[in-house]
Amino acid sequence: MYAEERQHAVATLVAERGRVAVTAVAEQFGVTTETVRRDLAVLERAGMLRRVHGGAVPSGALTLVETGLGERHGHRAEQKRKIAAAALDLLPGLDGSMILDGGSTTATLADVLPSDRRLYVATNSVPIAARLSASAGITLHVLGGRVRGITQTAVGEPTIRSLDDLRTDVVFLGTNGISPGHGFSTPDEAEAATKRAMARAAQRVIVLADSSKLGREHLVRFASVEDVDALVTDAEADPGVVTELEQMGIEVVVA
């Protein structure tokens, strides 16, 4: 295969999978990792992809853009339902405590929380709080602070101070991006600071994210891979990224 043919094939793989690893591409095309890195450099200069630690992602994957909550609710809804169903196995036991971060996938989990289990739930999400306010068996704690319109979540110093006083069994976090090199990230600094405080407030940190988030890197990292105990994603997740995350010590549950 000529270099141009291989580079075109690599660019197609990146577009289809969302992320490729240098080692996997080298094995697939029977070339050295140095050759793959040169190919990726050529493709990056052409604007066809972006290089990241250990591989490459589509050119639009590194972004500051944040979509609104309403838009995200309708995106990949079936995958989010499967993720929420799988996350039920990770709930704390009777009279357990948890934090629910804002976001469309965590909101889907809120929709399916069992009505026959007593739980303490703290959340910074206005929509999630509204969903759970009348739920039998749930003691609801709403975290105060400045509400961001785009995510409908409370953020800022008051939110973080209230989290500093909590210690829960588990936290379920949402994320905008996941990569082995950059970790878990979001476009907004205030959101990232609140997510960090949520992670500190829980004994077990679980991220819920559909497969489109894998391989994406956003402006602000709120957790490294080592800070997260488990990731729940869907069956379309790139096997290469899943393997790399697992090798770094995170439990990956594929719904």
Image (tube, helix red, strand yellow):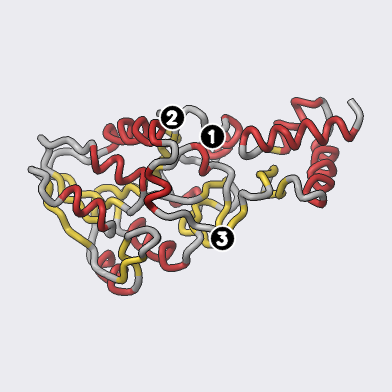
Residue 249 % position (x, y): 49, 40
Q: Which of 92 and 209 is in front in this view?
A: 209
Residue contact at pointers 1 and 3, CB within 8 angstroms:
no
- Where, by quadrant of the figure, is residue 165 drawn? bottom left
Is the residue 207 above or below the residue 63 in the image?
A: above
Disc 1 to disc 3, C-alpha distance: 24 Å
At label 2, counting other C-alpha atoms closer than 10 Å, the crowd grade (few under 14, some 14-19, many 20 or more) is: some
Residue contact at pointers 1 and 2, CB within 8 angstroms:
yes
First in sequence, mark 2 or 3: give its number.
Answer: 3
Tag 3: amino acid:
Leu
Query: What SS does tag 1 mark?
Result: helix
Residue 86 % position (x, y): 33, 31
> Which residue in the structure is indicated by mark 2?
254
Disc 1 to disc 2, C-alpha distance: 9 Å
Q: Furthest-bottom residue in view?
A: 157
Tag 2: amino acid:
Val
> Which residue in the structure is indicated by mark 3?
64
> Which residue in the structure is indicated by mark 1?
242
Query: What SS does tag 3 mark?
Result: loop
Query: What SS does tag 2 mark?
Result: strand
Tag 1: amino acid:
Val
